[in-house]
Amino acid sequence: MIYYKIKGKIVLSKIPRDSYEIVSEEEAKNTSGIIYSLTNMNPRKSRRSFCVAHPFELFLEREDLSLLKIYNGNCDDCDIPEWLIKKIEKREVTCINATFPNWEEVLDGPVLPKGKWRINIIGLGDVGGNLAAGLRLAASDYVSGIGLYDIDPNRIKRWKYEAAQVLSPSEEMIPPKLYPLTEDTLFDCDMFVFCISVGVPEVGKEPEDVRIAQFEGNAEVLKQYSKLARDKHFKGLFIVMSDPVDLLSNIAYNFSNMDEDGNMDFKGLAPEQIRAYGLGVMHGRAAYFAEEEGALQYLTEGRCFGPHGEGVIVADSIKNYNEKLSDYLTVRTKNANLDVRTFGFKPYIAPAFSSGVLSFIETIKGNWHYSATSIGGIFMGSRNKLLKSGTELETYDFSDNIYKKLQNTYDYLAEWYEKPIFHK
């Protein structure tokens, strides 16, 4: 292992890196805060940086679905000193993929704000508007301002007017301020939230998969904002809440990383900047149906994985998996949006609050929450947390039948990514 100092930060590498200052292990050992390791992976199928949660990830050579598995291998031959293992245990090591042309930007430190966050919401329809009101209501300790944007100026006026009137009688609670945005200020934030939806089917006229029906229209709009994020050199989180969130996240990644000729140059949004928030409501729906069945173990042991829609997987318990019950919960959870439509309404309240407001707050706090992040180039929903050292994925001792279902979902998403709309 070679120890370097780059931009004043300690960087570890298994192979020589030209033109960088070499330092002693003792200097590296006595460095406080986050240190870094370098690896080389295909940028199409890996993140630019992530939190090292286990010694085997220190110089990770490949990303795939197995990152969600508890590592049962033997690291006795990893030749990692005890002091470095302790830093990994404290989540003070970030692995950087040096194949990204702008990888050194990671060394500039976490882009996460030290105080409250500024969140900009783009698209003030059913979900976006309720998201704004919900953040105003619940996020005063974590959010300083909420930017509002829509192509319809009256929607901006409406939500600034109404959400600003969501106010606690307590004088101690200082709610986030609301700001109307212009095209020039869309990316003046820590979290950019894409909530624009094109062609949402009317109640009573639903296709078989309502979410997929919106894909092409939403994708074309998202492509433009993804390119704009590149042009603005946006460094915050780029959040997708429009359906289908998992597929659209890959659209955002691809098109922000294309040059003017349509070639991938990987100079746009990093994979870890992009997050899809749709699994939080699936967890909420699974919990609702589990309670109906008396399966209260779901509330503490249950988990959701995969997309916000087709391919979602519910496990009633990650410790004592009941396949029959889990399959039932999966079907009910996947179709819950259609249930609401049979009542004569569009399902947007729970998504805005469970996938949006509550999940955003837990993200800002650095706690476990549900969102889809890049795993081997596939945006796969799972529990994770966002730390100063990067994203940490929750890992599990999966039974073979659960893991096979997860792999099928992972492969299903990968097949979608091969379609032309993702590349031009």
Image (tube, rainbow, N blue to C red):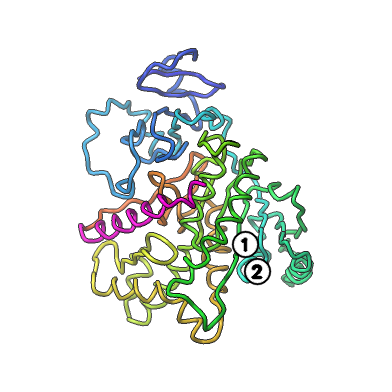
Q: Quadrant of residue 42?
A: top left
Which of these two is toward me, 326 or 199?
A: 199
> Is residue 410 located in the magenta-colored stretch of the structure?
yes
Q: Measured along the vertical axis of the image, is residue 302 above or below residue 249?
A: below
Kindly report the distance in space between the C-alpha atoms of the residues bearing marks 1 and 2.
Answer: 7 Å
Q: Secondary structure at mark 2?
A: loop
Q: Measured along the vertical axis of the image, is residue 154 above or below residue 275?
A: below
Can you tell which mark lies on residue 125? 2
Q: Measured along the vertical axis of the image, is residue 45 above or below residue 158?
A: above
Q: Quadrant of the N terminus?
A: top left
Which amino acid, mark 2?
A: Gly
Using residue 52 as the reference point, say whether residue 348 is left or right of it.
right
Labels 1 and 2 touching (C-beta < 8 A): yes
Q: Secondary structure at mark 1?
A: loop
- What segment is highlighted magenta in the picture? 400-424
Q: Quadrant of residue 167?
A: bottom right
Can you tell which mark lies on residue 372? none
Which of these two is toward me, 168 or 250?
A: 250
Main SS, magenta residues:
helix
> Is residue 176 located in the magenta-colored stretch of the structure?
no
Residue 257, horizontal then vertical, whole percent: 54, 39
Residue 93, horizontal then vertical, whole percent: 44, 34
Residue at mark 1: 196
